[in-house]
Structure formats: structure tokens, C-alpha cells
């Protein structure tokens, strides 16, 4: 059988690693497990040994899925900007292409995506029955809202808040829901399944006739804007994260802040919004528009922000490690003494909300930025 080793393409990058171990010092997963196999560079060298046929890929399969949450924090600190998240995804794709046996949790996520259109395996859709919006489902509307599977099934309140904002702006829009963007399949190494999903979503966006697609999920925006194109699927419309779109609505006067929101808050930068898409200022600019809202930055912010522990379906595969990561990041955010944590990603919100409900610290609630704006207009 022909070996499809995508890692050959990036093998030369490995030679630029100075072995300074900075990545090990800050790695999101290694910082809670302290396992040597979860340290970024030793893991990458294991991958390299497998790539060169010295180790069997079966021997590195489990650490490839448990050792990296794809947060990209290490790249921000790396002197040679090694993209360890990308190396990990390519190595996972090699495993899949070589037909190696994968952890059962990974296979369950993939089966769920194929049978229920979401990685969680939830069969009933919650979002569509919640509320009817006045301007939705219009053919050839200006905007199409892509809800994404987490908002469809877990954080339905984020979609409701955003569509309330769309209504207030008088927008004509349609909605694509009960669909996953496919990013989990890509990140787990199943690129053929990802491309199949991407083609279906791209066709739905094209059929909507909209010129702009907006999503409140950074992972969906990353998939639609970057990953579809990377794998040859065209989405020929503007793709925006909802924080960028809300900022545009505020700047153009289509929505106006009318009510004060008197709370001390802090803001968490989602990995996929910040380190993957480079969107750091739009959420802060939106929050700066809200009267009475005070925002205290956490010490680790923007490109150095800690990961929420939920990203890239990591929680579905490694629940215990995921909760430890979330708890560590939440403690860092709680040091601001803010009473409310604001974020801009359904997975981050869900991840931190579970901790906030249990802990007795200053942060009593977690909200998405769309919820705050919908209360203030
Ligand atoms: S921080 Fe970068 S250069 Fe240093 S060991 Fe890690 S990958 Fe290599
Ligand atoms: S991407 Fe995140 S979890 Fe993966 S090696 Fe880098 S810091 Fe660790």
C-alpha cells in the first residue's frame, strides 16, 4: 500500500527546532499531566521516528490524540515558530491514511459526525424550536447565519441572542442549522470526511444567495474561511465571526447601545478566534461600546491567553485532562476578581460555565459577547 506521509512535507521544519524546551514549559496539556509523552517536542520527535519507519505509528497513536489540544500556545513562544498543532493534525491524518487503529473515543466522534451531524452524537436539534425570528429564512437575504453544532445543541442562547441583534438591526437573513462545519473531522485526521461535509456546507451557503456568512463559533469561521479553501472547497462569500459583524453593526449605527450594563467583567480570548484567526480587537471594541461595563484584562491575554480545555473535541476524547485545563485557565481569569466572564466561543462558554457553577470564586457567570450586546440594545 502506498504510504501517504504528509509529514514529509513539513519534516524540514523539525530541523529548525533548537530544542530549547520552551514549548514544554508552557504546553497546555503537559502543564496539567506532566507526562513526558505529552511534552510537545519529545512527542514530535516520536512522530518523526514513526515517519522514518523506526517506530510503528501504532505506538504513537494514543499520544497523538491525548497529548495536544491544538491550542497553538506553544507556537507563540517558540523561537522558530514551530506549528506543533499542525504537525499533530498531519500526523493524525497519516495514521488514518495508513489504516492504523485509533482510540475508540476518536472513532466514536467520527461515527457521531456521520450519523447525527455533530461530534457529540445528539440526535435531536434544540435550536430551531426555541424561537421564531422575524427576518429569518429569507431567500437571497444579505446574511446567512451558520449556527454550528455546539450552538445547535448546547449553547442555543448564543444563537438566540445574535439573531435578536440581527432583528434589531433590521437585517434580512437566513439560517443554516443542524450542521457541523466538519472541523472536528479535519482535526482528527479524517480529511475525506471533512471534504464531504465542506462541499455540502459550501453548497448550502451558495444556495442561500447571501453575500456574507456569520458564525458565532470561531472553529466554524476557521473552517469556512481557511480550512475549506486549504482542501480545495470554495466558499465565495465573506466569512465573519460575530464579534467582527457586531462591531460593524455598531459602527454603522444599525444597532445602538441603549441600556447600561454595570458589571466588572473579564474577557477570555478563544484559541481559534485569536491564535488561528487573529481576531483580538473586535471583541474588545464591542465591549468598549457598552456603558457601565468595566473590563479587566487577565494577565495572560490575546495571543498568550490560556486554553479553555474544550477545543477541537478534546473534551469528548480526554475528559479528565480537559477539565484540568479548564480549571487552570478559569483560576487565571478569576484573579481579575471580575464577577462576569465574557467570551466569544460556544465551546469556551460551555467549558468555563461548568467550572463557574461549581467554584465559589468571584466569577459567578459566563456569557457570550452576543448575549451582553443583546441585553444592552
Ligand atoms: S519552543 Fe520551539 S525551538 Fe524550542 S523546543 Fe519547542 S519547538 Fe523547539
Ligand atoms: S498546540 Fe497546545 S496542547 Fe498542542 S503542543 Fe502546543 S501548547 Fe501543547
Image (cartoon, helix red, strand yellow):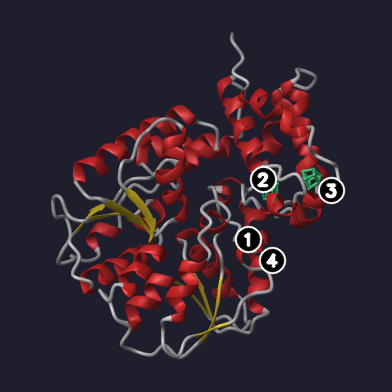
Within 8 Å: ligand 2 and the Cβ of disc 2? yes
CA gap between label 3 and label 1 equals 19 Å
**Whether label 2 touches label 3, CB < 8 Å:** no
**Circle 2 crowding by C-alpha within 10 Å: few under 14, some 14–19, many from 20:** many
Secondary structure of the residue carrying tag 3 is loop
Which residue position is annotated with label 1?
Answer: 303
Q: Dot 2 lies on which element?
A: loop
Dot label at residue 197: none
Neighbour class for label 4 at 10 Å: few (<14), some, many (≥20)? some
Please give the name of the residue rendered at 68% of the width and 68% of the height, measured from the top-left corner.
Answer: 300
Which circle's residue, 2 or 3, is located before the other in the chain? 3
Identify the residue at horizontal 22%, vertical 66% (top origin): 131
Measured along the vertical axis of the image, is residue 302 above or below residue 259? above
Residue bearing mark 4: 328
Q: Position of residue 185 (x, y in %)?
A: 48, 37
Report how far apart the C-alphas of labels 3 and 4 lie in the structure. Answer: 21 Å
Q: Quadrant of the N terminus?
A: top right
Q: Give the answer, above or below, for where 11 lies relative to 266.
A: above
For label 3, being within 8 Å of ligand 1 is answered yes
Q: Nearer the viewer, mark 1 or mark 2?
A: 1
N-term mark: 3 or 4 = 3
Q: Residue 259 in the image: x percent, y percent?
A: 33, 89
Residue hosting label 3: 21
* Residue sitting at x 74%, y 54%: 77
Few, some or many C-alpha atoms within 10 Å of disc 1 (few <14, some 14-19, many ≥20)?
many
- Give the label on residue 68, or none: 2
Q: Tell me whether circle 1 and circle 2 mark residues in contact (CB < 8 Å).
A: no
Label 2 or label 4, whichever comes before in sequence order: 2
Q: Using the image, determine if residue 233 lies above or below residue 77.
A: above
Asked if residue 299 shows in the view, the reply is yes
Amino acid at each position: 500500500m502506498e504510504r501517504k506521509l504528509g509529514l514529509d512535507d513539513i519534516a524540514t521544519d523539525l530541523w529548525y527546532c533548537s530544542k530549547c524546551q520552551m514549548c514544554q514549559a508552557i504546553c497546555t496539556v503537559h502543564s496539567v499531566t506532566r507526562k513526558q509523552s505529552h511534552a510537545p517536542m519529545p512527542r514530535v520527535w516520536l512522530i518523526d521516528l514513526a515517519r522514518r519507519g523506526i517506530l510503528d505509528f501504532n505506538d504513537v497513536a494514543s499520544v497523538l490524540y491525548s497529548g495536544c489540544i491544538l491550542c497553538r500556545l506553544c507556537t507563540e513562544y517558540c523561537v522558530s515558530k514551530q506549528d506543533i498543532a499542525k504537525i499533530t493534525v498531519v500526523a493524525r491524518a497519516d495514521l488514518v491514511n495508513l489504516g492504523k487503529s485509533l482510540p475508540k473515543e476518536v472513532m466514536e466522534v467520527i461515527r457521531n459526525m456521520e450519523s447525527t451531524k455533530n461530534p457529540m452524537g445528539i440526535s435531536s436539534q434544540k435550536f430551531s424550536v426555541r424561537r421564531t425570528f422575524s427576518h429569518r429564512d429569507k431567500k437571497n437575504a444579505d446574511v446567512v447565519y451558520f449556527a454550528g453544532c455546539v450552538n445547535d445543541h448546547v449553547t442555543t442562547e448564543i444563537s438566540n441572542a445574535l439573531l435578536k441583534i440581527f432583528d434589531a438591526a433590521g437585517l434580512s437573513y437566513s439560517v443554516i442549522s443542524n450542521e457541523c462545519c466538519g472541523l472536528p473531522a479535519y482535526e482528527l485526521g479524517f480529511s475525506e470526511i471533512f471534504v464531504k461535509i465542506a462541499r455540502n456546507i459550501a453548497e448550502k451557503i451558495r444556495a442561500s444567495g447571501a453575500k456574507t456568512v456569520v458564525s458565532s463559533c470561531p472553529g466554524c469561521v476557521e473552517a469556512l474561511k481557511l480550512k475549506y479553501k486549504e482542501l480545495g472547497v470554495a466558499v465565495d462569500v465573506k466569512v465573519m465571526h460575530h464579534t467582527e459583524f457586531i462591531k460593524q453593526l455598531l459602527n454603522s449605527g444599525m444597532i445602538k447601545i441603549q441600556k447600561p450594563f454595570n458589571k466588572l467583567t473579564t474577557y477570555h480570548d478563544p484559541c481559534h478566534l485569536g491564535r488561528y484567526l487573529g481576531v483580538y480587537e473586535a471583541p474588545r471594541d464591542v465591549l468598549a461600546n457598552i456603558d457601565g461595563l468595566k473590563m479587566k484584562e487577565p494577565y495572560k491575554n490575546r495571543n498568550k491567553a490560556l486554553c479553555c480545555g474544550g477545543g477541537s473535541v478534546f473534551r469528548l476524547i480526554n475528559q479528565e485532562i480537559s477539565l484540568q485545563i479548564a480549571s487552570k485557565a478559569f483560576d487565571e481569569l478569576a484573579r481579575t476578581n471580575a464577577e462576569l466572564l465574557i467570551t466569544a466561543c460556544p465551546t469556551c462558554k460551555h467549558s468555563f460555565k461548568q467550572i463557574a457553577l461549581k467554584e465559589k470564586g468571584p466569577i459567578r457567570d459566563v456569557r457570550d459577547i452576543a448575549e451582553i450586546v443583546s441585553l444592552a440594545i
